[in-house]
Image (cartoon, rainbow, N blue to C red):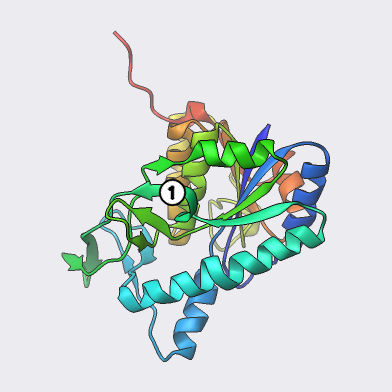
Amino acid sequence: MTVVLKIGGARAVNPAGAVADVAELVAEGERVVVVHGGSTAVDDTLDQLDEEPEYVESPSGVVGRFTDERTMEVFEMVLPGKLNTDLTASLREAGVDALGLSGVDGGLLTGPRKSAVRVVEDGKKKIRRGEHSGKIESVNADLLDTLLDGGYTPVVTVPMLADDGTPVNADADRAAAAVAGALGAELVVLTDVPGVLADPEDSSTLIERAETPAELETIESAAEGFMGKKVMAAKEALSGGASEVVVADANADSPVLAALDGGGTHVLPAALETEATA
């Protein structure tokens, strides 16, 4: 089994439990790839530089960051720099032979750069230019397989490498989805809530499973704000070849092992709409 683990960058997420679980899985001979974000650390750094982070809403209602040139510079400092180094060091301290990579290294994550993005502002659809982000269309799975076969645990973060040779931002959830799809892996997305909640204000309303298109529709309807992007990533992972996706609580006891054992919200390939064959 290969597990792709996405550790969220939210302030409320403590990676210690996930690090211990990765160490246990690797000791048992499992192949693990860790993917991490760092939106909170990027925002904190922008604040220290007297820069204002900007979030925009897409026409479909998904909230995401608008990455201008200055923000991109901060991304390159914070994610493959401090955060990747710190997480790699934590894993190595736990006995994992971890190796840090950005999507630029070895052309790990590549695809086209976005020249503009569609956003909704004050109820009106607009085009915003100057965006330094891209869409991951290719994963260098051979590189990851080589590292995994050599006993290493890759620790992956953005930026990705655009097809014009420029490092650009990409969403870390969708990066993890692309990696999981390319490896045919099980994707575990750890966040600061127990999973997808029918009522975002009530942690007891966890939706445990989606095995049919109707159940997936229920999850999509319930997913608000940033959770909408995680559900989108789940669909992309399954479409790309992932065996299962779990969205679960990073702060639970043994969060990764608990997720693999049935905790959180599980989305299965059968939940995707399939076209009827003639």
Which residue occupies the foreground of this view, 73 or 11? 73
Return the residue at label 1. Answer: 107
Question: Badge 1 local density, few (<14 within 10 Å), some, or many (20+)?
Answer: some
Q: Quick one: quadrant of the N terminus? A: top right
Label 1 sits on a secondary structure element that is helix
For badge 1, the amino acid type reads: Gly
Q: Position of residue 220 (x, y in %)?
A: 43, 46
Relative to 204, 21 lies left or right: right
* Residue at image coords 23%, 65%: 120
Q: Position of residue 229 (x, y in %)?
A: 43, 54
Judge whether residue 108 can be spotted in this image.
no
Q: Quick one: quadrant of the C terminus? A: top left
Measured along the vertical axis of the image, is residue 41 above or below residue 125? below
Judge whether residue 148 can be spotted in this image.
yes
Q: Position of residue 267 (x, y in %)?
A: 55, 37
Q: Position of residue 158 (x, y in %)?
A: 47, 59
In the picture, residue 74 is in which quadrant?
bottom left
* Residue at image coords 60%, 64%: 84
Which residue occupies the foreground of this view, 164 or 28? 164
* Residue at image coords 46%, 87%: 47
Relative to 210, 67 lies left or right: left
Measured along the vertical axis of the image, is residue 238 above or below residue 126? above
Relative to 6, 174 lies left or right: left
* Residue at image coords 37%, 63%: 63
Relative to 132, 155 lies left or right: right
